[in-house]
Structure formats: C-alpha cells, structure tokens
Image (cartoon, coloured by chain):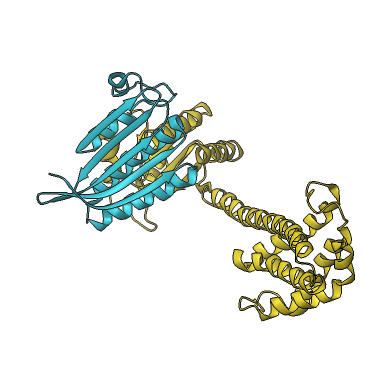
Amino acid sequence: MTLSLSKDTIQVTKEQDVVFLKNRVKETAVKIKMGLVNQTRLLTAASELVRNMMRYANGGACIIEVVSSGRANGVRLTFSDSGPGIPDLDAAMRDGFSTGKSLGLGLPGTKRLMNEFNIKSKVGEGTVITIIKWN
Amino acid sequence: MSIKTHILLQKKKKNILELWMKNQLADEGLREDLISNDELRGQSEELINVLVGNLSGDNFTDFDSDEWSPVIEILGGIAITRARQGFSPRETGNFVFSLKEAILEVLQEEIKGDPQTLFTESLKINRLMDNLSIITFETFIKGREEVILRQTDEITEISTPVIRVWDGILALPIIGTLDSARTQVVMENLLQEIVETGSSIAILDISGVPAVDSLVAQHLIKTVSATRLMGAECIISGIRPEIAQTVVHLGIDLSNIITKATLASALAYSFKIMKLEVKRAGAVNKF
C-alpha cells in the first residue's frame, strides 16, 4: 500500500521550467533525507523524462509526491503529456533506440535508475510515466 | 444637445491635471523614493498634453489609427522607465487608472444634467483608458522581460570561462545544467581558445554540474570529439561518485574518453602527457 503524503503539481512548458522542476525535485528529496546517490539518480531520471516531454510533446505536467509504504519513504514523480504518444513501447524501452538523434538511453536508463517505473502511452493521446525512488 | 467631449477635455485640461496630480499624491502607493513629485508632474503633464491634443471626435474607439501612436509612444516610454526603476505593476497601473478617475470626475461635473450623455461619454472614456492601461502593462512586462533576458545572457557569458592553467593546457569549468544552447557556447569558446593559444590539452571540469543525464553526456561526447578533430586531447574531470554511478546505470559509454575524479588529477595527467615534471624546489637528489 503506497500512501501519498504531499503533492505538488508543476506545469512544464518552457526551458526555464525545467530547472525549476529539477530544483523542486531536489528539495523534495532532501526533505525526506534521501542519500546523495539516490538524490542524483532521481534528479537524473527527472531530467531525462522532462527533456523527453519537452522535446516530443512540447511540455506537460509533473506531479511531485512524497510517498510512504510501510517503513520506507520515497519520491514519486508522475509525468503526463498530451503529445503524440509512443507507437512501439518495447522498442522505446530498448537501449540505443531513438526516433530523435539522441543516445536512446533515456527511457531504459531511467528504468534502471529507479525502483519503480511505469509507462502508459496511447498514440495521439499522450504519455504518462510514473517513477518512484525509495529512500 | 450633443456635447463634444474632446473639446470639453481640451478646455478642462488644467483641471484634469490638477485632479490627477491630487489623486496620485494622495495615493498610498506614491513612491517618492523612486520618482520626485516634480518629475511625476512632468510625466503626467506630458502625457495629458499629448493625449488631449490627439483627441478628436471620432478617434475614441478606433485605437489602431495613427493619431494614437504619439500617445502610445509616450506611455510606453513611461512604462519602460518605471519597469527599470523597479515600480510594482500596481503602482504603474495606478498611474493610468488615476488619470481615468480624474477625467471621469471632470466629465461628471460638466455633464451634470444629462445622465444619458454622461453615460455614453463615460463609456467612451473608459474604453479609451482601458486600452491605454493595457498598453502600459504590455510595455511594463516587456521592460521587465528585457531585464531578465539581459541577465540570462550575462549568466551564459560568465558561466563559461576558458582558463589557461598552463602553457598548452586549457581548463573549462562548467557550472549548472548543460543544455544544447550552453553546449554550443562552451564548444565555441573552447575551440576558439584552442586555436588562439595553440593548446594541446583541454580539461572539461563538470564538478558544478548537478546531474549528468544522457543528453548532457551526449553533449560532452560531442565536445570531446570536436576537440579531438582540432588535434587536441580532451579530459573530463570532476566526476563525483554519485555521478559515476548514475552514468553507469544509465548505460552511457564514456570509456573512449579520458575521465578523472578531480581537476588536480586531470592536470597531473596532462603534465604526464606533455612530459612535464613538477618538483619541490630545493629538493636534493641524494643518490
């Protein structure tokens, strides 16, 4: 059972919002006393996903939550956009696959960095990605 | 009986100005620290002169007509100076709103006996002054944005210095997030400096980069490749333990690049490549 303890929604539409979002994620991680390595992992994952959102969907929204399950605390981020969606999720989750000219490590890399990773995407409707990093 | 509002306003210009000044001076938000009363009076008088001078019977509603451009120009000028001087939006807005009040007050005084005309004329004045307020705000925000843009430019400029740490060795500390625009600036500065100084080694220090994600890594790889094309070697230093772990988990391959944990070790490595030795002065070789 995962409980949400605090909730914060941030709209991302401009380059400047990206830095703001990353600062907020970091603040949240610091608040629950997350270790430095996990903080960096979370920050990197957030950075990957928000960049994808900016690049492919022209922005979207991110919900930052402090979640609790049993004795563990963690940070849950939900990125949702109403962009074109991902036609082939299996391919998108493969290392080195990119429709842009990037390294193609964003999605699979993020999955490796996080404890929980959940992606839902519908072509023409948008994509929702939820990640959790436990403390 | 039709009343020519513009003629009336022209006649009552002095009254309006006095009323307006009274409103402004009585306002709690009067910023004597930012603008003196004389200066304020000067600004107000200038605006009211141009405004009333440009009024004619039929241009009340047609705000796109050229007759309004001098008014817009002056108002824009005032708004921009106010934005730079640090006035709050409310204070800037009140400047125009208090003029509206003054005009309406005079109008009320003059067209006392005819509520119908008073209403239609007030409506016209309202519409006109609202338009002026909107222009004031648009210019005010533009003035503020210019300040922000200038600061952004300054930050990009300051944040990418190229340092000559040794003859033939350049160091480039990167602070903050490395996005496409920053990378472009970094790369340009670095490559230019390599040519100018004839350096053979460039050290990119990323101690100040909070997180290295795949895009940042890609930008780093590009910068290193470009440096190599110029015939110089590029070392990336300042890789912190948590960054190292994240890069590995992301699956980014940096094995083709020389990386060091600290700038000091990168410099030591550069000395080794250049066959330079650092010795303690006065050390005697006993053998």
Picture residue at 90% right of the left edge, 64% below the top: B7
**Front residue of this view, candidates B185 and B204:** B185
Res. B170 visible in picture: no
**Front residue of this view, candidates A8 and B57:** B57
Q: Quadrant of the N terminus of chain A?
A: top left
At which x and y percent is residue B148? 58, 54
Q: Which residue is at the far left?
A: A70
At which x and y percent is residue B244? 28, 40
As drawn, A108 above or below B31: above
At which x and y percent is residue B172? 48, 45
Of the chain colours in the picture, the one used for chain A is cyan
Q: Which chain is yellow?
A: B
Picture residue at 44% right of the left edge, 24% below the top: A101
Picture residue at 70% right of the left edge, 77% below the top: B23
Picture residue at 25% right of the left edge, 51% below the top: A36
Left or right: residue A114 versus residue B193 is left
Q: Quadrant of residue B22?
A: bottom right
At which x and y percent is residue B30? 65, 77
Left or right: residue B94 versus residue B76 is left
As drawn, A58 above or below B239: above
